[in-house]
Every structure is written in C-alpha cells, then in structure tokens.
Amino acid sequence: MNLATTLLTVAKRLPSQPAVTEDEITLTYEELATRVLAIAASLRERGFAPGDRIVLCMENSTEFFEMLYGIWAAGLCAVPANAKLHPLEVRHIVENAGARICVTSPSLESGMRPAMPEGVQIIVTRGADYRNLLDGTATGIVECAPEDPAWIFYTSGTTGRPKGAILTHRALLAMSYCYYADIDYLDERDTKLHAAPLSHASGLYALPHIARGGHQVILTGGFDPARIFEALEKYENVTLFGAPTMVSRLVTAAETIQLDTRNLKTLYYGGGPMYLADLKKAQSVFGSKLFQLFGQAESPMTITGLSKAQHADTTHPRHEALLASTGFPRTGVEVRVVDENNRDLPYGEIGEILTRSDCVMLGYWGNPDATENALQDGWLHTGDLGTLDESGFLTLRDRSKDMIISGGSNIYPREVEEVLLQDPGVVEASVVGRPHKDWGEEVVAFVVTNPGEGVTPERLDAICIEHIARFKRPKDYRFVGSLPKNNYGKVLKTELRKLLQEGATHQEESP
C-alpha cells in the first residue's frame, strides 16, 4: 500500500491529463510520474533506506508534488514544514525527524543554509542539485506496509516544542476515502486550486484529487483574492481551501465585484472558529458550496464535518446552532465527549473530545510519553473541549491547550513565552489570544520585568524575530507587576483574557 501508486495508476490511465499547473506551465500526469520515479531512483541511489525522512520546507510549487510522491515511491517518509517558519524552527524539525536532506525554495535558501545542522544537505528547487535528482533511472516503486509512516506533520504542543504526528499510508488513504464519502465525487474534470500552504490543509486534500486524476493549480505569491477570482473564471469544478480568515477576505473582496461562482464546486474551511455572522455572509456570496471540517494534525482533516447540504438547510429547526457547530462525525469516524475519567458525558455537557478511526496518527515521532498521553485504548484525546447533542453534531466550546489560531495558523503560547524569557530582563511572561476581526485572533503577551532593565516592546520584538516565525510574534505587550496565579502557582490565563476584555470595553466607552 504505497500512496505513490495512486498517482502512477492515473498516469497510465490518463497520461495526457493535466496534473499540475504553476504560472501557466503544466505537467501532464505522464510527465509528473516520470519525474517522480526519477527522484525515487536518485534517492535510493544515494543510500536512502525505507522509512528515512526528508524535510520539505518550500513555497508552493510543482516541485512539492514531485518530491512528495518521489519520496513515497522510494519508500521514504515526507516531513512537510510550513515555509513561514523561522529557520531555527525548521532546524528543530530536521533534527527531531533525523532527516539528512531538507528541500527548500530559492527564496528561503539564504536563511536555511546557516540554520541547518552539520551533515544535512540543502537541496534548492530548480537548482543543480535538484536537477540531479531528476537524472535518476526509474526502476519502479518500493512496497510499503499500510502502517508505514508516509507524512510526519509537526504541530506544537503545550510544552512549546513541536511534535511530529506520524501519518501512515493507511491514514492518508482513509482520509481520502472519507473525502469521497462526505464531501465530493471526484474525477479528471475536477480542479484543486491551491492558494494556501501545500504543507497543510490544501496539500493534504490534493491527495484525493490526484488519486482521481484531478488538476492541481498552484497560485504562487501567497493568498490573493483577485487571482483566485481570475482562476474561477478560467477553470471548472474548482475546489479551494480557506482558513476562516481567508474566507472572510474573499467575502470582503467579492463585495466590490460581480463574482461569478458557477465554476466553484466546493470551498472547504477549517483550522479555526468561523463566527456565525461571517459564515452567513460567506453563504450569501458562495451559496451552498461551503463545507466545514474539524480535524487535527493527529487526525488530518477528518473528525467531524458540516456538509454543503447542511449549510444550506434553512428549514432545519436549529439551523443557526448547526452552523455554529462543527457538524457530524465523518464516515467511519467515531467521536465521544468524556469527563476527566474518560466516561461518556450526557448530551450537552462539556468535556474532552475523543476520536477513533483509521485516519488517526500512529503516534508522535520519537516521543513515547506524548504518544501515551494522546492515544489511550485506541482513542485520540484531542485536548479540545466540546459538546455533543442528541442528533450527533459536535460543537467546540474551548481549546484546553490554550492554542491561538491567527490567520489559520496555530500558535502555542508556551513557545512564544520561552522566547520572551530569553531576555535577561524578563522575569515572567504569559501569552494569550485576543479576538481580531481580520485574523481571528492575535497574540498578546503579559510580561513581568526586573526594575531598571529597560525592557521595551522593540527589544522583545527583536528576540522573537530572531527565534520564531513573524506571525507568532506578539502584537501587543502588557507590562505588569505580577501575573494572576492559583494556589498551585499556575498562571490564570482566564484572568488575563478578562483584563483584555475589560480593556477593550473601556476603550469602546471612551469618548
């Protein structure tokens, strides 16, 4: 069960079918398969053995798919990393995964080279080393077991250190099957438009499209509503991913034009809360083409979902409550809400969300303790809090891990706090999220300093920029004399959020 087989099968059946288009340059499935098999052969010639890991930290490009399927064809494991990460964050991923190669984009090379551990080779797409990979003599693919690692998805945890969720060939195939069962029938007439990072939700759902011969269209240069609208005029049966903030940007941009959505098949969204008012606006623009998904890196894209039909069902007696939920368990997926003793809670009571399916990760790479905490008796403990109702739909109530979601990207307070504490003048730091009308949430840091140390926001900004991605940097610093704590010395972040809320209220009341 090698995922590369899904691509190679389409290449035999539909050799001339467009596979990937980037900046008007298109590879057919036959051409893509040829490059994939050449890369696989080159990697084996370089001594890579089944199960070895290769990190892909690159901007959206055709080479992402060439490398992803080439890695699988060689029996190896891909480790995609967000191109927005700081090079030192990528270094940790490379070291933790034990990767010998990091493939990156020309624009990222200058930051990556000095950050990589000794002995790790940097391969730059469209450079000489990458062209050498394409010189391999194709010899077929390596057989894989269903439980073999295919994709390690690094996601931060409450400790602030990224953990690698191991997604197997079986898990990613199950994810694809759930797509067909719950979202859409796909074939070679479909277009998958990529305007969000391929290392995350957009790239994951490329897999079910490629397996059915769909056309992958890559919009380079970041998320641009104008270019997305142009693509909707050009391509048919378009499926697109958007974090809630991206969907809101599309809605805002559509207000000034006469948007034709006939070619839009599905806009799936997730990765953060979508406010009911924003969702209603999106429905007024896109109609009944929205699909909401709830998942985690540990169960990629696949825990619950709210279908296009459910979005459009205004006759439902609790339609607004349905829209505010994350929908129903996906096909073949079990969901529970439990108390602290793992006992199922009555309908409507808040508890931790658990899930079980073939989509769930194998565990965390090299982290048996975290694996044991997350996977218990076959169930994934998500760390998210929610409620189930009598009809079976799930509503998220809180994030027990204090995760902040800004612009669709996950930010974990502890990793920001640890960076702030590197300043010798900082005694304590606690980070929380503040609602933001465009990005969903923004990072605010409460900081206790030593008197006379002269700690300033600019000084803390410089430390953050040196160590973490810019989107994780606090947008506001609150210098306080102490942090509110309970009897056990734990910082009460609920109190910090109240301070932010009170501050916002006072500001609104000011003349």
Image: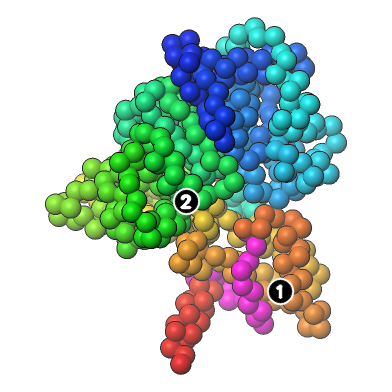
Residue 127 appears in the picture as rendered: yes
- Sequence order check, earlier mark of 1 and 2: 2
Question: Image height check: is 10 above or below 462?
Answer: above
Front one among 34 and 499: 34
Q: Going by the image, does 328 lie left or right of 303?
A: left
Q: Which colour scheme is used?
A: rainbow
Residue 357 visible in this rendered orientation of the protein: no
User: Where's residue 449, x and y in %?
Assistant: 74, 77
Name the residue carrying label 2.
Answer: 226
Provide the residue span drawn in magenta.
472-494
In depth, the one of 463 and 225 nearer the eye is: 225
Name which residue lies at 77% across and 71% down: 459
Q: Is mark 2 on a helix, strand or loop?
A: helix
Tell me which residue sits at (53%, 15%) in the image.
30
Give the number of marks: 2
Q: Give the quadrant of residue 14.
A: top left
Camera-nearest label, 1 or 2: 2
Q: Does the magenta stretch include residue 473?
A: yes
The quadrant where residue 244 appears: bottom left
Question: Residue at the right extreme?
Answer: 118
Determine the residue positioned at 70% across, 9% down: 137
- Mark number, residue 457: 1
Q: Residue at x 81, y 79 (%)?
A: 453
